[in-house]
Amino acid sequence: MLRFLLIIGLISYVFYKIGSFFFRAGAAAQELKNYKDQHKNADSYKKTKKRGVKGGEYVDYEEIK
């Protein structure tokens, strides 16, 4: 009976370690994907961003109520 519990415990420990390894690898891959997507979106925003302000008129701050 003790041998059976020891074997079950060792098998559980090995599965725990293997599972945590794959979980960390998956989380790291997801983080890398999010990082790349974030920088890709920022680069595309910089390319399409218009420079300067066109049109409009000056409104004195004190006139606004």
Image (spheres, helix red, strand yellow):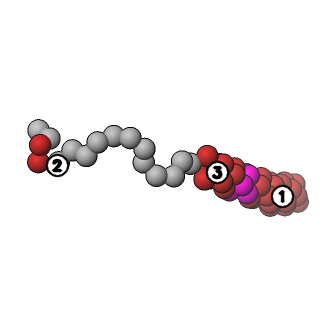
Q: Residue at x 56, y 48 (%)?
A: 49
- The disc, 1 or 2, on the residue closer to the chain's N-terminal end is 1
* Main secondary-structure element of the magenta-colored stretch: helix
- Per the image, is 25 magenta? no
Residue 48 location in percent, x, y? 61, 46
- How many neighbours does mark 2 have within 10 angstroms: few (below 14), some (14-19), or many (20 or more)? few
Q: Quadrant of residue 65?
A: top left
Q: Residue at x 21, y 44 (%)?
A: 59
Which amino acid, by three-letter code, is at mark 3?
Lys
Q: Kindly identify which numbered label has been placed on residue 47.
A: 3
Q: Give the magenta range.
A: 31-36
Which amino acid, by three-letter code, is at mark 2?
Tyr
Q: Kindly identify which numbered label has been placed on residue 18.
A: 1
- How many neighbours does mark 1 have within 10 angstroms: few (below 14), some (14-19), or many (20 or more)? few
Image-based side of 2 in relation to 47, left or right: right
Q: Is residue 23 visible?
A: no
Q: Quadrant of the N terminus?
A: bottom right
Q: Secondary structure at mark 2?
A: helix
Which residue is tagged 2? 61
